[in-house]
Amino acid sequence: LGPRMALAAALAAPTFAMAEKPNTGGLTFTGSVDVASNYYFRGYLQENEGLILQPAFSIATKPMAFDDFSVGLTLSTWNSFHSENTLSDGDGAGAWYENDIYGQVPITVGKFIFTPIYTLYQYPNGAFETIQEVGATLSFDDTGAYTGLGSWAEGLALKPYIAAYYEIDDAGGEENGYWEVGIAPGYTFDLGQFSLPLTFPIMLAGGWDDFYTDSDGDNETLGYLQVGVTTSIPLPIPEEYGVWSVNAGGYYQYLIADSAEAANNDSNDVFWGKIGISFVY
């Protein structure tokens, strides 16, 4: 991470699923805009003051699909705008801190999804140099696997996954590797005329090649632990305009690595949240 270690660089690639959609064409369009209280990247503090606005957009298709096998293609962009002009060099777009461009190829075999990912990290305000990264995720859809436990478990799913990423070109520092493992159990609570879907993501992250370091500058394998709770509530918008939702989440991170703690004003504890709106068409 080089000079980015004190205020780390980019975000783990988001996964844009081929969700239910109203259009019958071969393309799925997904977009969102979130307002975040803080921006942490893989345990490293980026910004915790002012307005943090994070829009994203993706186009996905599935050119090959059979009963238990499919291959998809997703092109995405994720951005972070900061009213504090975080680390701006004064020559670029001061509030436009980050622009990430992703290419993903999700390969589904039964309930397993393997997704190679290429990411281009750009910093329009000049905060850092451009970075290129490759990685992959492997996830398992265990929806319906626990129905034998009783009616209460019919909607239960743990959604386990593992992921690993490595920088193949870091113009501003050294190339490093990052990994994470996690689950995202979800449950929908029936409140009479209203249902509340909740997801409880739990994730342990680490790295190699000095992505995280101890107080002596040596590699630390473990970076941070994160737990959270999220929800997505549909909006009453006509289907021909897409499926729209209000999304919200709250998170707690325990910073394990000394380098992550140092970037967070020498504190191990991190609390942050976000709220936003999204659509699928």
Image (tube, helix red, strand yellow):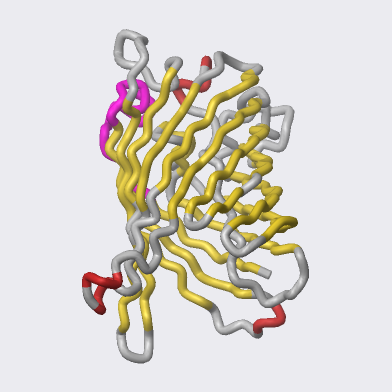
* Quadrant where the image shows the C terminus: bottom right
State the residue in front, 71 or 46: 71
Which is nearer the eye, 79 or 153? Answer: 153
Residue in the image at 43% along x and 35% along y: 42
Q: Residue 263 appears in which quarter of the rendering? A: top left
Q: Which of 68 and 118 is in front in this view?
A: 68
Most extreme residue toward the front, as rendered? 67
Quick check: is 264 in the magenta stretch? Answer: yes
Residue 112 location (% of width, % of height): 49, 51
From the viewer's side, name the closer residue of 68 and 113. 68
185 falls in the magenta region: no
In this rendering, the answer to whether 274 lies above or below 126 is: below
Residue drawn at point x = 30 percent, y = 13 percent: 215
Name the residue at 42% across, 32% down: 44
Q: How many marks?
A: 0
Residue under the point 27% across and 31% down:
267
Give x and y (percent) for residue 251.
34, 51
Residue 242 appears at what percent x and percent y? 66, 75
x then y, percent, for residue 154: 32, 74
Q: What stretch is highlighted in magenta?
A: 256-272
User: 274 above or below 191?
Assistant: above
Q: Which residue lies furthest to the right in this view?
A: 25
Q: Which residue lies furthest to the bottom in this view?
A: 193
Q: Which quadrant of the view contains residue 193?
A: bottom left
